[in-house]
Image: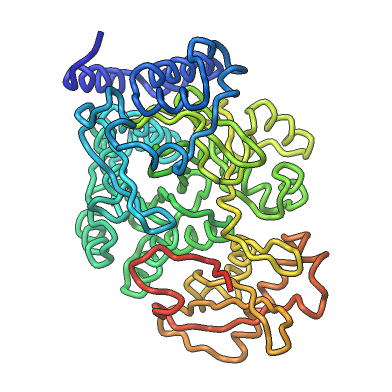
Amino acid sequence: MVTTKSQRALAGLQTFLTTPLDELLQSVDEVAKPVLDLFHAAATEVPAYREFLAAHHIDRSEITDLEAFRSLPLMTKDNYLRCYPLDRLCYGGSLDRCDMVAVSSGSTGKPSFFPRFVTDELQVATRFEQIFHDSFAADRKSTLAVICFTLGNWVGGMYTTACCRHLASKNYPITVVTPGNHKDEIFRVVQELGDYFEQVVLLGYPPFLKDIIDTGIAKGIAWQKYQIKFVLAGEVFSEEWRNLVGERSGAVNPCYDFASMFGTADAGVLGNETPLSICIRRFLSEHPDAARALFGESRLPTLVQYDPRDRYFETVDGTLLFSGNNGIPLLRYHIADEGGVIPYADMQRFLAEWGFDPALHLQDRGMRPLPFVYVFGRSHFTVSYFGANIYPENVTVGLEQPAIKDWVTGKFVLQVKQDPDRNPFLQIVVEMAPSIEASADKVEAIAKAIQAQLLRLNGEFANYVPANQQMPRVMLSPAGDPEYFPIGVKHRYTRQS
């Protein structure tokens, strides 16, 4: 039995480094045993989870199949993670089994701590391997991986760095450099090191990477010569955004030059975009009726594939749960993200009904029969206007239209306000690109572009909001405005009045 940290690390690294990706992703139909094994390990070895089950009068010996597993109480930050000392949430009731603690401020700004061990990173490294192998062909192309996430305590930058280094240890010709979110350092390392490699991968938060590309162009950087690829996380973006960033960076094949990750600080990466999922999403972005039929929403979610043996997904009342092993094992963990799960065969049938075959649009890479999970994000990141839910994703598309996109950074603040007679109106504060001046003509053009996309994409808006109230009131704000667009913090696209 593997008991010491060195034995656990050696066994995990041996498996990861010597097992080809194709083998790691085989037999994904067998999902019951891994999640049941995880449950019984946590129920036996994690003091907090034993107490949690006892408080809910759960006899762990009765949890023998998936039906019984799905009867277990949901786990949340409030009813579990914040109710027990950090060490009692870990195996053996001790932090000694872990080797690192990551920190996330979360949406509330209060820090949360997530212990983990190197073997937890290896699970997530497989998601990176899938991207670098299937999308970027980095198993045979020399690749500079530029970490543009914030470094330090924050989970994203350090986790991403570790996973990319694990791939390098697996004989991928990858070299990692860590400028973090320092723009001048990113420009410097790309320009001084990029020519030594066949391709450069930028890994970071979508709005920040767009700013890097745009600012780099203004500085005269010829991004096209570096064969730029993107690994993204932390935000839903539109296909128009992908087209725009691809056009400006020279990334000419959207299905193979980009990959977004769906993850949480609590458990690392849960799933990742693949060439197949991107191809499907691009079809759905051009066919809103098909997207509504599949997702039941007018907005387009992030669509990824996942390994059900590694992260077991469920849905409850339209929100996602997952179970997965970490320094703190999580069972039926409710993350409050709206979304759902689509088996691979169901997705194939749906696309056939709509006459779309993604294989006709893809190369011979990235077509793995993995299930899909889609995620919209959390419902409180919307505003309600005349009973219609207005989503930032709908507004984003309006700002990415050809006549608009060069004026703006892509950031905005959406809110419902009242005029002196207490009549509601939809206000959108839009951040202008550096050196672009506001004007009445720009205000009118932006408002019309946003209205057109709201009417096209959002059935509630088109049907609930009176015609004379559908034109948003746009206010243009300079880049970095401290009231709406403070520099150095994660942007919030909605504000409650």
Can residue 339 be seen here? The reply is: yes
| As drawn, 459 above or below 289 | below
Q: Is residue 240 above or below residue 315?
A: below
Horizontally, is 161 left or right of 482 in the view? left
Residue 306 image position (x, y, % from top left): 51, 32
On the picture, is 193 further left or further right than 470?
Answer: left
> In screen coordinates, is 210 left or right of 14?
right
Q: Measured along the vertical axis of the image, is residue 126 above or below residue 32?
A: below
Say which residue appears at 32% left-offset and 39% top-offset: 141
In this rendered view, identify the residue nearer to me: 263 or 72: 72
Query: Percent x, y for residue 12?
Result: 27, 21
Answer with the quarter of the image where residue 40 lies: top left
**In front of the other: 422 or 409:** 422
Q: Quadrant of the N terminus?
A: top left
| Residue at left offset 47%, top offset 24% | 53
Return the x and y of residue 3 as percentages of the image width and height. Answer: 22, 14
Q: Residue 127 at x, y = what percent?
A: 41, 34
- What residue is shown at x 51% (from left), y 69% (from top)? 410
Quadrant of res 385:
bottom right
How many numbered circles does the render carry?
A: 0
**Residue 202 appears in view:** no
Q: Residue at x 67, y 47 (%)?
A: 283
Quadrant in the picture for the C terminus: bottom right
